[in-house]
Image: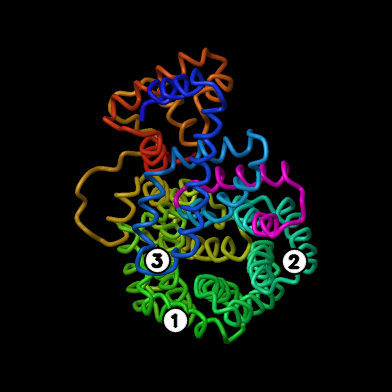
Amino acid sequence: MLETIRQYGRARLTSSGSGAEDAVRTRHLEHYVRLSQRYRAECFGPRQVDWIQRLIREHPNLRIAVEFALTGAGHVRAAMDIASNLWNFWFGGGFLREGHRWLTRALAADPEPTRSRAEALWTGAFLGVHLGEADAARQLLAECEALVERLDDDSLRAYHAEAAGLAALHRGEVADGVALLADAVAGHRAAGDLAGLTDSLILLAAATLFSDDPRGAAAAAESLELCEAHNAMRSKAYALWAVAVHKWRAGEHRESERLSREGIRLQRVARDWTGLAYLLEALAWCTAGEGRPERSARLLGAANAVWRLSGAKTYEAPPYQAVDEQVATQAVGEIGAAAFSTAFEAGKALDLHGAITFALEEKTAKPAAGPRDTGPGLTRREVEIADLVAEGLSNKEIAARLVIAQRTAETHVENVLTKFGFSSRAQIAAWVVEHRGDR
């Protein structure tokens, strides 16, 4: 819906008086609270991909609902619930920073020690770790741990252990990460939480990859079995990554490559850019093991670009960074620094379509758009506006950021929508995620 139409409808509601606008927006908010609860309940299973596609379509309405909850009286907890229920939508869809921002605002606005707060604390920490905000995540996890003990909730205890284990791994504290993630696996298993169990098994497989713990390959295999048994295709892509990297560690490079490619094919449908970055990185590792240094360098560059598109900074975490550096050093030794740099930059310049096509060694259907693609004749200002829309800013916030009139911001947004033939801000955001080298 165009912003001008939305504003017209709001003006009509306001003119109705007697709290009509607040009543309608409250019902709108309640609808999206229920929607987020349904997503959380159904997010592991055959409807995973359908749900992600629906949430992308609903993204503008979700933003409106959460903003209303954060600014209206008595609704902050609803914002907290929506943002935490949708944590893996933010995580995989290129909206990491937006989801983290909603959770940060909700936590600041409602300090009451509730279960909703505990959920927001661990999900906020989980997203924060991937954004590289280790200190802030540590504070959230400390508060979450104390609140979980106060509530004496075993399900929350398992999720806290999962997020804390991830944080330890990203700090390079691998042994601590393995212990916490093993606790998370046990907790989710006892609770019968299949989504939590699968995620924790994948993370345990990740942590054990960087240690001599023998549980990693078994954890990865179990996660893949769970995904296949429940037809959870989005989660399966991560499970394939977990099995692939353990095959790589065992020296089974061809099998690792096959599994990584299978996961990348799934991402064409799942469109989880964080998951795609993991898989491209794994493919670079096993390609190096097969003695293909130039291709490995290009895949490292493609992975780097997709990491930036997703917003996740896993590639900066010490364990992952160490392997990337090892693979890069090996490639440089084989083809030289100049050839490595050329290949890396070529991979980094690929758009998502190009990265997937290259990874699968398919015939290129179209040239890479590159990190500065400006779409269908957008002006420099319209490109800037599109970037801010992708950050989740409203027209009012865009106007304030750029020091322009709100009506001017609205006109720019409408021009962008018209040039693309789009009907929603979410479509602009999706285009930016796919075509920008760095959000």
Determine the CA span between mark 1 and mark 3.
13 Å
Determine the CA span between mark 2 and mark 3.
39 Å
Q: Earlier in the sequence, mark 1 or mark 3?
A: 1
Residue that carries the numbered disc 1 in the rendered image = 251
Q: Decide: is 76 above or below 361.
A: above
Task: Please state which of the two labelled residues, at mark 1 or mark 2, is closer to the viewer.
Answer: 2
Q: Earlier in the sequence, mark 2 or mark 3?
A: 2
Q: Secondary structure at mark 3?
A: helix
* Residue at image coords 76%, 67%: 151
66 left or right of 354?
Answer: right
Give residue 417's quadrant in the image: top left
Q: Which mark is residue 283?
A: 3
Q: Position of residue 217 (x, y in %)?
A: 50, 83
Amino acid type, residue under disc 2 in the picture: Val
Q: Decide: is 341 above or below 64.
A: below
Which stretch appears magenta? 93-121
Position of the N terminus, as image quadrant, is top left
Q: Is residue 412 magenta?
A: no
